[in-house]
Each structure stands twice: as C-alpha cells, then as structure tokens.
C-alpha cells in the first residue's frame, strides 16, 4: 500500500515520459470512444463496433508487415471496413450480423497471414501481442499529434451530427422524410466509429478495443436516458478507467519481485467491466419518483379510455 | 501430406468441421452469431490460464468457455444481449492477455491459440477432442426437436411447454463444450468463421433443415481440408485459408439466393 | 382426448391478473363449449393477450382459476390447446419449409430426432389441406405472405388434434380477402372437427357471421355471452365505465364514445341482467 501511494504522490509516475504520453493519448481515446460508443449502443450496432476492431487488427498486422506505424493500419482498414459494412447494408438485423461476421472472419484470416509473414521478415518480437492487446506505454511520440487530431475530428463530426444520428436511429424512414441523407450520415458515423476503434486499438489493442467503446457507454445508458448526459458520463467513466488502469499497470511492476508488469489493457478492461456491473447495484425503487407515478397514472387513464370510434 | 504425422491433423480438423457445421446451423438460426464469436474467446482465455497454472489445457478451455456461455445466458436475460455478449467476449480476451503476459512464452502461444495450429495436434489432445465432439453432437441430436421449435418458433414453443430459456441455456452450453475443444486446432478467432460461414451458406442452397445441417457440415469439411492442403503447401497459417474460404462459400450462397429470388415465378393464388 | 358430453371445455372463474403494480384483469369469468366459435374482442391494450397467456398457463393469475375439461390447469403445454401467435419473427432465408413447420406441430416438444415416415407425411398433408395451404407446402415459410403464414401456423396448431384453438389477433395485418379466407378456414375447422375456436381481435366485424359467443374485454373486465346479448349499449357502457353507443350501420357494428359519464351508471351485472330481460 505504501508503494501505491508513493506512486501517486512521488514525481516518479508523471515524470516518466511514456506515462505522460499514455495519459494524454488514453484520455483522448477514452473520451472519443465514450461519446461514439453511446451512439453505437443506441443504434444497436455493438457488433459493428466489434467487427471493425477485428478488421482493424488486419490493418495493424498489415502495417506491421510493411513497416508502417500501426495506427495508420488500424485507421485505413477501419474506414475501409466501415464503408464495406455500409454497402453490405443495414436491412434485416439478422442478415447483417451474419454478413458482418463472415467478413470479419476473412479479415482476421488476413490478419493471421500478415502477422505470420511479418514475423518472417522483421525481428521485432511480440508484435502480435501489441497489435492485439495494446501498446499504451510504447506509443511513439511522433504519432501523438495524429492520434489527438483524429480524436478531436471524430468528436467534432459526432457533435455536429448527433441530433441527426439519434433521429435516424429512432426511425430511418422518418429521418428520410425530413430530408436527411440517411446513407451519407450513416457513412459519416461509421467513419467516426472507425476512428474511435483505431484509437482504442492503439491504446488497448484491436481485439480489446470494444471494451472502451461499449463498456462505458452501456454503463452510462443504464444510469441515464438522456443522450447528451450519457455521452458525458461515458467519456468520464472511460477516462477514469484508463487513468486507473495506467496507474495500476505502472504499479504492478512492483507487485512481484520479477519486475514483470501486468498489461494496461487488462486493467482497463477489468475496471470497465466492474463499472458496468456496479451500475446494476443502483436500481431505483418502483413508484418512488414522480416520473414513475405520472407514467403509471397515464397508463391507467389509457385503459379506461374509450376509443373515439372503433368497430366492436 | 498424408503421412502418419499429418493423420492426427486430418482427423482433428474433420471432427472440428463436423461440430462447427452442426452448432453453426443453430447459431445462425437463432441469430446468435455474435455469441458464436464470444464463446471461443472464452476458451482462449481458459487455455492461457491453464497454461499459466501448468494445468492441462483442456480444463482451462472447457471451464472458461462454459463460464462465458453461462455469463451470456444469465446476464443476457436482464439486459441487451448484444452489449452483454460484447463485454463477456472482451473480458475473456482481457484475461487471456493477462495470463499470456504473465507466462513466459507468450508470443507463439498467443498466435496459435488465436489463429490455430493444426500441425501440432498430438494424440493426447485428439482423444478428448473426439470424445467431446461426439458428446456435443449427441446432445444436439437429443435436443433436436425442441431446440428447432424454440429457435424457429419461440412464440409457440413456450405455449407448447418447451421452455425457450432452458433451450437457450442448453444450446449455449453445448456450443461452449463443443468449441472449446476445437480452439487449439483452428484458433479462437477463426472458429467463428468455420461455424457461421458454412451454415449461412447452406441455408441459401436448401430449404430443408436436415439437408441444411448436412450441407453445413459438408461445406465446413471442404473448407478445412482445402485449408490444410493449402497450408501445408504454402506454410501460411490455416486460419487465413479458413477465413477466406468460409467467406467465399458465404458469398456464393448470397449470390445463389439473389439469383433464386429474381427467377422466382409467381405462385397460384391459394384457395379460400 | 375425448370430452364428456355436456361438459364445458374451458372455464375461467374470477380471473384477476396484477402486473407491475397495475391491475390488468379483474374478475373475468366465462366458459367455452366444445366446437364453439368465440370472439375475444376488445380495444388494444385491454388485456386480451394476457388472458390468452393465462389460458395457456404462461401467466399465473393473481386470483381465480382456470379449468380445462373440468380439471384445474396443471402445467404448460399439453395437447388440449393449440396456439397460433400473432406474428412470426422469421427471416426469408430460414431453412424451414411450410411442411417442416407443420411437422413440428406433431411432436416438436419431444426430445430426439424426427423419424420421417409415410404416416407423418400424410398427417402433414392432411393438416395443410384442412387449412388450404397445400399449394405452398414446399416453399420457405419465411417467404410466404402474412395470410399464408397464418394458414401454416393454424395447420401446425391443429395437427396434434387439440380440442381448443387459441388465436392471437390473426387478422391484424391481413387484407380483406385473406381475412375472409382465414375466418372461413377456422369456421370449417370448428364445424367439421369440433374444435372450439377462441380468436382475439380488436375489430369484431370480420367474425360477425361465424361467432356465436363473444367475450368483450375492456377496462380490465369482461362481459361474456351470446353476441347479441353482449354487444349492446348498456352492457358495454357498464364495462367501459362511461357512456358508449353501439351502432349497427350497414350490417357492421361500431362502438363509439357517447356523452361524458354521468352519475347513476349501471354496474356491469345489472347491465347484463337488463340484456337478457331479468331485473
């Protein structure tokens, strides 16, 4: 315990450059993922988010193969995947799940190939691990501007489109009738999603990025139904989980004498899941709030109501 | 390619394909393809954990896959299933990452657990695979009728006395046990492709449920056999071929469905 | 399963259902005789589906009891009752033909694999003929129209020879011709195979010709009896608790809201008593 406090209080933690980078990037990632994630959950597209993250794996592996920074691989593959998914279509939910999943399968197969070929040509070991499970502490400083910029861009896109996105989530037909270009908006959203996923992949790995996307959002939506509030809550939850994760990972080096730390991604994921489970603990009691009572009264009135003119 | 060394590989892969085809048919029917993705990942975490603790990999696989399946089944009742499944999936992977990072030879093990390693199938692993595969198929055979009823006509099933909830749990458990055995062979991330691709393709080609299962198994077998042959020749990972070939069959099925719908002649009006 | 002569098939006594702190049904009682064609009528949200679930054993009533063939309902399922749900969630690609769906009606609840046999095939063909669905027996059930799917589901429900057939809003999304077709099929089944039919609907008119009895559900309560006795202004007004008018217009029946409720509304029982002439 003493070692723990020592970490926070002592300048050791924040004076370490990798940690500072991790905190900065981690915050951008958490906020972007939280906000985009809320929209994803509302639009019931969690599976799409996960598929994109696996497609991003392919991109990361491909980037590794050709020797380019993994973030660009994640991003380009993510956007390509997003465009492809929008093309495959958004018709029946069930059909879409299967189509997305099969495409994901092919993409992961390609990822397997790239990783294999990459290990043949390069000498870096453990590339599989960082692509799949994150490289929060080994982010190279020259990619930081790109990471931050794309995060901010995605947030701006979402902020501008948020009302339209909620409308199309509610009823695409209604939105189309109101003159909304549903397809274009859908693509814009998926691109923002691809960016969020890529950022998340850099931080905690392609395969785990769904946690930052879905977890805080799902938790926030259990606590409030107002989208704006949920987005803020999700960003907050994600950020707290990321900071704590970084802290614990840094501290874990001292837990065993071997000097081997636990991965940041594990802590972040575990904390997010704990947060989600905690949201089950608070359950408002029935009939207590004024809103519940009003709703019940309205329903009761409805039942007594005689339809204006109805066939018997 | 057909030496005695490879014999285990052919047998193991064939068993995997049969299990994948049968469970995949129901997974697609029930619209639970995402769960088919999550449960093998649970197996991945289990394998990693078992490796860390020095236990037989089999136990870790089965226990974690089951835990994942039951987690989805239990939590999925109270909230949205897609969110819960995603979280369970990720939790399993996170644990797997932890276990792997704590063990010493994580690079190769990671790779093989996620993408498969057919060429290292030992005889000791083959027997449990065969046994658990047989058990899984027997379970599906016994549950066939009520499972089909609960999957295709859930509204009616409850009225007929078939508990859809119990069928759901049974199915998830069977999927967990069956796929946990197949993960070391095909890999956690690609088991899903083998389960869903052939089953989704099969339903495009035939309307009869029995034929669809048989066809799903057949397509899965062709996929792994072609994959093994190609992998042997080029030394590229089996998972790559499985993913691509499964997607290929799926697209063929989609094309066939589209062509069939366009060519459909109008039916005579029904008598009143 | 043979029904003793003179014994009613289904009896509900004082059924009450309370869900989430809200009283959905209160003191609902009626009987169904063998071979009877009964309409379960009421506006949307009145509790018709809940009532059907109580009869099926899927919803435990908070009060009252259900008697099937004179015996209290034990558990779900059983061969006595066939059920046709409102809408199926089936996608067009599903590998299940109409005849496969109907075959599931024979023994879909039993464990094990179905053994194909000539006898099974004959049973399925018969059921499809009885509902007029034989023309599309081999088509994918997900590609059938609403009316066609209804016929297939009716065949599925009757193949195990139930004595009572429950249908939840089967006419809701059908065009006029399909509506008439379904009602004709059901009426024929009731007549020829002595299957009692309880069909829920919010519009009674398509059923007017065939129903002899009606259970009208509104405001959580029900009035049951012969059609002409129940669909009357005073009975329905007592049921709704406010003034409604029953109009007969061009052979169709309309229930419209009347003036606001005044003091001295007659209670339900008195309304019924007035209907059959007692005082």
Image (cartoon, rainbow, N blue to C red):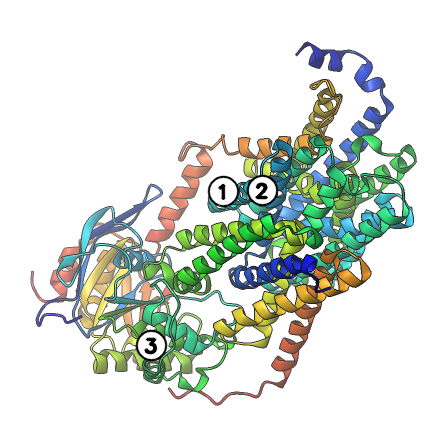
Residue matched to label 3: C206
Q: Which residue is mark 1?
A: B75
Name the side, left or right, on which B185 lies relative to C29: right
Q: Position of residue B190 (x, y in %)?
A: 67, 55
Neighbour class for label 2 at 10 Å: few (<14), some, many (≥20)?
many
- In which quarter of the view is residue B257 placed? bottom right
Q: Which residue is mark 2?
A: B88
The reply to the same-chain question for discs 3 and 1 is no
Can residue A200 be seen by looking at this rendering? no
Measure the alpha-carbon separation of dots 3 and 1.
44 Å
Residue shown at 74%/36% (left/top)?
B105
Quick one: label 1, few (<14), some, or many (20+) residues within 10 Å? Answer: some
> Going by the picture, which residue comes out furthest to the top?
A2
**Which residue sits at x=49%, y=51%?**
B172
Label 2 vs label 1: CA separation?
10 Å
Q: Residue at x 66, y 46 (%)?
A: A39
The location of residue A242, given as percent across then percent down, is: 71, 30
In the rendered structure, the answer to whether residue B38 lies left or right of residue A148 reads left
Identify the subunit bearing mark 1. B
How many angstroms separate mark 3 from mark 2 (CA)?
Answer: 50 Å
Find numbered disc 3 in the image and state the secondary structure of the residue it sits on.
Answer: helix
Per the rendering, the mark at residue A285 is none
Disc 3 is attached to a residue of which chain? C
The foreground one among B92 and A223 is: B92
Q: Position of residue B81 (x, y in %)?
A: 53, 48
Q: Secondary structure at mark 1?
A: helix
Let me know if residue B88 appears in the view. Answer: yes
Q: Nearer the viewer, residue C276 or B254?
A: B254
């Amino acid at each position: 315990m003493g070692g723990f406090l020592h970490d926070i209080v002592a300048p050791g933690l924040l004076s370490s450059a990798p940690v500072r980078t991790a905190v900065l990037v981690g915050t951008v990632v958490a906020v972007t993922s939280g906000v985009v994630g809320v929209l994803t959950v509302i639009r019931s597209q969690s599976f799409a988010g996960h598929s994109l993250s696996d497609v991003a794996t392919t991109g990361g592996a491909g980037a590794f193969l050709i020797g380019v920074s993994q973030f660009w691989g994640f991003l380009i593959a993510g956007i390509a995947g997003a465009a492809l998914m929008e093309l495959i279509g958004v018709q029946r939910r069930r059909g879409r799940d299967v189509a997305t999943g099969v495409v994901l399968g092919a993409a992961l197969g390609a990822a397997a190939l790239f990783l294999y070929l990459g290990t043949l040509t390069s000498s870096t070991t453990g590339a599989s691990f960082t692509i799949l499970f994150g490289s929060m502490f080994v982010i190279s400083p020259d990619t930081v501007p790109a990471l931050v910029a794309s995060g901010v861009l995605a947030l701006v896109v979402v902020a501008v489109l948020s009302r339209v996105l909620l409308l199309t989530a509610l009823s695409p037909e209604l939105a189309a009738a109101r003159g909304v270009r549903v397809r274009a908006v859908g693509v814009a959203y998926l691109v923002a999603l691809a960016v969020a996923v890529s950022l998340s992949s850099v931080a905690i790995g392609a395969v785990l990025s769904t946690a930052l996307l879905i977890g805080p959002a799902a938790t926030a939506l259990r606590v409030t139904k107002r989208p704006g509030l949920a987005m803020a809550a999700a960003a907050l939850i994600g950020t707290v989980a990321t900071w704590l994760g970084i802290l614990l990972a840094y501290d874990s080096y001292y837990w065993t004498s071997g000097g081997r730390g636990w991965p940041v991604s594990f802590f972040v994921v575990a904390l997010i899941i704990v947060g989600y489970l905690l949201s089950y603990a608070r359950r408002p009691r029935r009939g207590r709030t004024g809103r519940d009572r009003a709703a019940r009264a309205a329903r009761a009135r409805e039942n007594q109501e005689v339809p204006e003119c109805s066939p018997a | 390619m057909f030496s005695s060394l490879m014999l285990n590989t052919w047998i193991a892969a064939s068993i995997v394909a049969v299990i994948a085809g049968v469970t995949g048919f129901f997974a697609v029917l029930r619209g639970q393809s995402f769960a088919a993705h999550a449960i093998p990942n649970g197996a991945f975490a289990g394998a990693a954990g078992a490796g860390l603790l020095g236990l037989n990999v089999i136990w870790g696989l089965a226990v974690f896959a089951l835990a994942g399946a039951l987690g989805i089944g239990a939590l999925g009742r109270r909230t949205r299933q897609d969110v819960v499944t995603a979280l369970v999936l990720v939790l399993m992977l996170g644990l797997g990452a932890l276990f792997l990072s704590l063990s010493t030879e994580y690079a190769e093990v990671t790779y093989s657990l996620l993408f498969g390693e057919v060429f290292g199938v030992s005889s000791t692993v083959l027997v449990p695979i065969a046994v658990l595969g047989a058990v899984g198929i027997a379970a599906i055979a016994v549950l066939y009728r009520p499972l089909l009823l609960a999957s295709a006509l859930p509204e009616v099933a409850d009225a007929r006395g078939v508990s859809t909830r119990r069928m759901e749990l049974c199915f998830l458990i069977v999927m967990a046990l069956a796929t946990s055995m197949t993960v070391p062979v095909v890999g956690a991330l690609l088991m899903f492709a083998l389960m869903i691709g052939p089953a989704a393709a099969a339903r495009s080609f035939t309307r009869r449920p029995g034929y669809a299962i048989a066809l799903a198994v057949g397509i899965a077998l062709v996929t792994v056999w072609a994959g093994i042959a190609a992998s042997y020749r080029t030394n590229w990972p089996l998972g790559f071929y499985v993913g691509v070939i499964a997607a290929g069959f799926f697209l063929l099925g989609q094309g066939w469905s589209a062509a069939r719908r366009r060519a459909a002649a109008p039916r005579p009006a029904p008598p009143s | 399963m043979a029904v003793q002569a003179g014994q009613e098939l289904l009896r509900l006594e004082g059924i009450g259902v309370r869900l989430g702190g809200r009283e959905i049904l209160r003191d609902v009682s009626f009987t169904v005789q063998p071979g009877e064609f009964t309409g379960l009528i009421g506006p949307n949200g009145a509790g018709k589906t809940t009532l059907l679930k109580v009869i099926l054993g899927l919803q435990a009533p908070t009060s009252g009891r259900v008697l099937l063939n004179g015996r209290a309902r034990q558990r779900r399922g059983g061969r006595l009752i066939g059920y046709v749900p409102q809408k199926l969630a089936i996608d067009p690609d599903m590998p299940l033909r109409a005849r496969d769906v109907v075959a599931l009606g024979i023994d879909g609840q039993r464990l094990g694999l179905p053994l194909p046999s000539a006898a099974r095939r004959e049973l399925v063909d018969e059921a499809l003929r009885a509902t007029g669905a034989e023309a599309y027996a081999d088509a994918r059930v997900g590609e059938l129209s609403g009316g066609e799917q209804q016929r297939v589901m009716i065949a599925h429900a009757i193949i195990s020879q139930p004595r009572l057939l429950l249908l939840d809003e089967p006419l809701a999304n059908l065009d006029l011709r399909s509506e008439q077709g379904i009602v004709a099929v059901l009426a024929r089944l009731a007549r020829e195979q002595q299957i009692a039919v309880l069909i829920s609907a919010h519009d009674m008119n398509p059923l007017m010709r065939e129903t002899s009895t009606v259970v009208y559900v509104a405001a959580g309560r029900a009035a049951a009896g012969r059609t002409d006795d129940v669909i009357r202004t005073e009975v329905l007004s007592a049921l709704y608790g406010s003034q409604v008018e029953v109009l007969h217009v061009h052979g169709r029946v309309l229930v419209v809201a009347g003036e606001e409720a005044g003091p001295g509304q007659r209670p339900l029982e008195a309304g019924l008593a007035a209907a059959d002439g007692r005082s």
